Amino acid sequence: MAKDEQSIPSVWARPRREREQPALSRDQIVAEAVRLLDEEGIDALSMRRLGSRLNAGATSLYRHVANKDELIELAVDAVYGELPLPEETDATRWREVIARIAHGLRATILRHPWMAAKLGEVGLAYLGPNMLRQTEHMLGVFESAGFPLDEADQAMSTLVAYVLGVTTSEAAILSMIARSGQTEQEWVEHLWPAAERAVQDYPRLRARYAAQRGRLSSQADQDGFEYGLQRVLDGLQSRLG
């Protein structure tokens, strides 16, 4: 292995190890890691814990991944493989395609809340094959709409930053509710009196909380996400004028 490859701490920066064991493949390891992360959260992930779930020793896992960071890179890319790649032959309908992608990314992160906190910490995750396919697809949609390739890249980055920014907060709430052992309805009902007391001295916030009483946070989040998404798309569409 070249020295430069050794110095870059990413699973995507070195050749894949081919010492596969018939009884345990890298895909099996990654799939079980995703299940563990979904069920127990990022703090529960360790090579020893994962090996126990796979009925294998940690040494067996190290034949396929060098460390926990590489495992998380692979898990993130596996989750990106769930994202839809909606096709549309009419370039004038680019907003609909991009909106479906944005909603798909949001839904995927909310199914895997651990991912929101890790996306900024996973090194060269953008070199994963599933993320590369998603990136190429989005660039193609923007380019077909009329954006030069360099601006298509900026438009894509702006959209993804919006989705991740909003969804990170949503995922944090979902994780908090899951740790509480309550349903979302129960959690909201228990939180609401404290929230109303907190905003008593702030008339605008008090009015907003009164208007939202009884609504689940997920309903409000969906509405807020759609509003912001359409304003981002409005801004991008103005660039095509």
Image (spheres, rainbow, N blue to C red):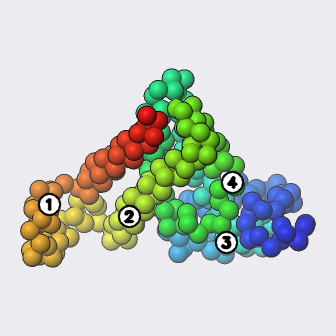
User: Residue 123: image x %, image y %?
Assistant: 65, 66
Task: Residue at the far top: name it.
Answer: 90
- Residue located beneath label 2 in the image: 169
Q: Quadrant of residue 133?
A: top right
At numbered mark 2, what does the secondary structure look like: helix, strand or loop?
helix
Q: Earlier in the sequence, mark 1 or mark 3?
A: 3
At numbered mark 1, what does the secondary structure look like: helix, strand or loop?
helix
User: Would you call the spot at circle 4 few (<14 residues within 10 Å), some (14-19), or many (20 or more)?
Assistant: some
At numbered mark 4, what does the secondary structure look like: helix, strand or loop?
loop
Whether label 4 touches label 2, CB < 8 Å: no
- Residue located beneath label 1 in the image: 208
Q: Quadrant of residue 60?
A: bottom right
User: Would you call the spot at circle 2 few (<14 residues within 10 Å), some (14-19), or many (20 or more)?
Assistant: some
- Three-letter residue code for mark 4: Gly
What residue appears at the point 74 percent right and 71 percent down from the top-left corner?
9
- Disc 3 from disc 4: Cα separation: 16 Å
* Quadrant of the drawing holding the N terminus: bottom right
- Residue located beneath label 4 in the image: 128
Camera-near label (4 vs 1) is 1
User: Would you call the spot at circle 1 few (<14 residues within 10 Å), some (14-19), or many (20 or more)?
Assistant: few
- Disc 3 from disc 2: Cα separation: 25 Å
At numbered mark 3, what does the secondary structure look like: helix, strand or loop?
helix
- Three-letter residue code for mark 3: Lys
Q: Earlier in the sequence, mark 3 or mark 4?
A: 3
- Three-letter residue code for mark 2: Ser
* Quadrant of the drawing holding the C terminus: top left
Q: Which mark is residue 68?
A: 3
User: Residue 138: image x %, image y %?
Assistant: 57, 41
